[in-house]
Amino acid sequence: MVRSLLFQAKLPSEFWVEALYVAAHLINVLPCSRLQLSTPHEPNPPPPTNPVHPLNPPTPSSLLGQPNSTCPTSTLHSPTSLPPTLNPSPDLHSLSSPVHPPAFINSPSATVASTHVASLPPASNPSESTCPCPDSVFEQEHEVSTTPLLSAALPPSGVVSRRLHGMVARSQVGVRKPKILPSMVHTLLDLTEPKTFKQVQWFPEWQHAMNEEYVALLHNKTWVLVPPPCGANIVGSKWPGIDYDETFSPVVKSVTICTVLALALSKSWPIHQLDVKNAFLNGSLSEPVYMSQPPGFVDPQYPNHVCFLQRALYGLKQALRAWFQRFAAFLYSCGFIQAYSDCSMFLYHSNGMLAILLLYVDDIILTASTQPLLDHIIALLEKEFLMTDLGVLNYFLGITARFNSDGIFLCQTKYVADLLDCTGMSDCKAVSTPMTPKQKLVASDSPPCSDSTQYRSIVGALQYLTFTRPDIAFAVQQVRQYMHAPIENHFQAVKRILCYLQGTLHYGLQLFKDFSPSLHIYADADWVGCLDSRRFTSGYCLFFGRSLVSWSSKKQPIVARSSAEAEYRAMANAVAEVVWVR
């Protein structure tokens, strides 16, 4: 867009800053479909109604410029003064005033359009006057075009044609444009989730949620107001990353969840899920932390005081660890013991009865050998913490749990659908395998893929999807090796995995209730799976009865000297997993 404005005004590239100001201003005052055809300026205080002019061709200057020199007029200026001009001297850029008033190119008598949205002419087709907001990163080429922006802001007589020159353009057949995500446009238009207090005050629903959160902070006695200590570091509402020592906190492993669910199914135990409200506010801090009062909630009696935090807050590096220590201490007082194999699994034994609690941050899975024991533990938890009993396990960590005649079916259908939708692959053609047969991915000096950040984001999402999809574990392991420097071939491999998910949207993991309590494991290794490092890839599948509870596909840490050595290493990893599960 900046290049188009400079070309339109016939200006050199030295004036790219002024052209950038014009581009940002035009984007701000144009309606957008994401904002219900309102402008990005409307959620904020209304902008000043200054006249807007395009970048003009050079005009004679006489005030601060050299005699007979030319200088282009600037675009945005105050209505109380003449628009400044820039003298493109090779030695100095000086400000001056133009001799002639600025006018639209090819239309000197055109009326200047106002920056206020009310002055924009109504569009017959909303799609023609809205800012494009691309949803696909694969099938669409992202390009910010200046023509619809200028044509929407200028009167009909001032519309500038796309081509202002007579040269013959090079054919674009076979030329692949880079996939560019206009981050500036996304930043300006993506206001569905406010980022600052100034944006929140324009959304009543967010104000209500903010007030509820503030009441919860006061209810948990999160802070006390004190005068600011001398020399203390006063942090803002968002944590900058200092004043903390230990931050690690365990979460329950996926194999633990599957194994406990399979065990509960085999014994017909009830399985409930619970959610802790404002979990982090229950944790106590061991370090002195001072925070400025939240914007919009400054105490009128003590406006200069600061918050001396007594409880952990969301965003604190140590908040998760503080919450886990607080929750674990309470379980210890109730008679629970922490499992040695998984620190987020707690066991309770009493009079031949057994209860198992799994904790993943603030989400809890609870099962017990009897219903009265389960109800008793839930009552103890609700008495100590503000939490909700969500009943029988249904939806946990983005995983849907469906009970059927065979046991329980775990799937991430909604997660897959959301992933396909946000990557623009919801209408892609399905394939039958997650990888091309006999395909070997290698590192290469080829040009990198157009968006390496998007590549890493998708691969990370696929990694979480392997919780219930062992069928894509090997394919994800292959593309995960090149997250540091992906190329286009790696990106195509990721697209194929997404195409496979499109055809297997409702696949998942079935845990059976009628099984013998025994462990069976299968292990294997390929032949030099990684051509770059010459290492083998080993994998295993662990069954608890008929239920698959653990699986892995991982490149071996060293180069094996023979296939027999690689097979033994694969068996060693499998045996280690069996020992851990037992």
Image: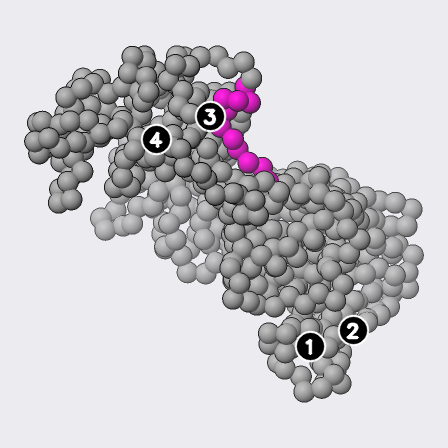
Q: Which element is circle 1 on?
A: loop
Q: CA distance from mark 1 to mark 3?
A: 54 Å
Left or right of residue 2: residue 357: right
Q: Nearer the viewer, mark 2 or mark 4?
A: 4
Q: Which residue is mark 2?
A: 523
Earlier-in-chain disc, 4 versus 1:
4
Q: Nearer the viewer, mark 4 or mark 3?
A: 4
Q: Which residue is mark 1?
A: 528
- Residue 523 lies, with reference to residue 240, above or below; the image says below
- Residue 532 lies, with reference to residue 490, above or below; the image says below
Q: Nearer the viewer, mark 1 or mark 3?
A: 3
Is residue 117 visible in the rendered image? The answer is: yes
Residue 303 - label = none
Which one is nearer the viewer's eye here, 334 or 367?
367
Q: Nearer the viewer, mark 4 or mark 1?
A: 4
- Residue 427 lies, with reference to residue 98, above or below; the image says below
Quarter placement of the C terminus? bottom right
- Residue 356 lies, with reference to residue 77, above or below; the image says below
Mark 4 belongs to which amino acid?
A: Gln
Range of the magenta residues?
126-136
Left or right of residue 228: residue 163: right
Is residue 35 visible in the rendered image? The answer is: no
Which one is nearer the viewer's eye here, 467 or 320?
467
Please tell me which residue is depicted at 63% across the width and 61% down the height of the picture. 479
Q: Could you say where residue 62 lies in the image, as x and y percent from the top left?
A: 9, 27
Residue 304's quadrant in the figure? top left
Q: Which element is circle 2 on?
A: strand
Left or right of residue 67: residue 46: right
Magenta-highlighted stretch: main secondary structure?
loop
Residue 148 - label = 3
Earlier-in-chain disc, 1 versus 3:
3
Q: CA distance from mark 2 to mark 3?
A: 59 Å
